[in-house]
Amino acid sequence: MPVSKPPDWSRIVQRHAERVYRIAFRILGSVHDAEDVSQIVFTEAVKLYNSGPIQTWTGLFVRLATVRAIDVLRQKRSTVQLDESDRISHIGPPEEAVGAELAVWLRTATSNLPEQQAAVFSLTYFEQLDRNEVAAILGMSVETVSTALSKARQRLMSQITVVKEGRT
């Protein structure tokens, strides 16, 4: 049986690094946390490669980046403030403050969702992938993605209602 040639890790990292970082940053909202998650993802990919064949590198990296970023959110459980240098805005201070507060709230609320719902919601809204892409990445049917997305929205909407009622 022929021995397979090991992958060119520098090429793999070069090809997928931007996507992994972007996913982690959109979920976490922090440059430093996104860099940490990126390192974790590539380290974990090496371990997974050593334990068996990889069907699709893109799917593996998108899934790992999403799940590990959500793990970091869950570990923090506190609000994540964006540094001024992490964002670019052309809106006024009041709108910017509201947007920042909503972004922090959404990241925190997403981290409280069940893992499958959090992953589906994050890939759909933070990465703007369609249901077919999310289904392929997470290895589930499109119907399961739609159901998980609907449940995630319902949970988040019920939390918004509770927050809204608590302020009135």
Image (cartoon, grey):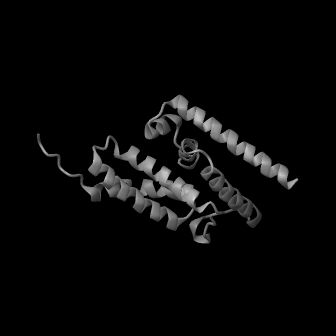
Q: Position of residue 9 (x, y in %)?
A: 27, 57
**122 vs 73: above or below:** above
- Give me the residue at 62% from left, 50% from top: 110
Which quadrant does the N terminus fall into?
Answer: top left
Q: Position of residue 86 (x, y in %)?
A: 57, 67
Q: Nearer the viewer, residue 134 or 37?
A: 37
Q: Nearer the viewer, residue 130 or 105?
A: 105
- Give me the residue at 52% from left, 38% from top: 130
**Image check: 146 left or right of 92?**
left
**161 vs 34: above or below:** above
Q: Position of residue 37 (x, y in %)?
A: 46, 60
- Give me the residue at 85% from left, 55% from top: 167
**Image check: 118 left or right of 48?**
right
Q: Residue furthest right?
A: 168
Q: Residue furthest left?
A: 1
**Image check: 110 left or right of 47?**
right
**Image check: 2 left or right of 25?**
left
Q: Nearer the viewer, residue 34 or 98?
A: 34
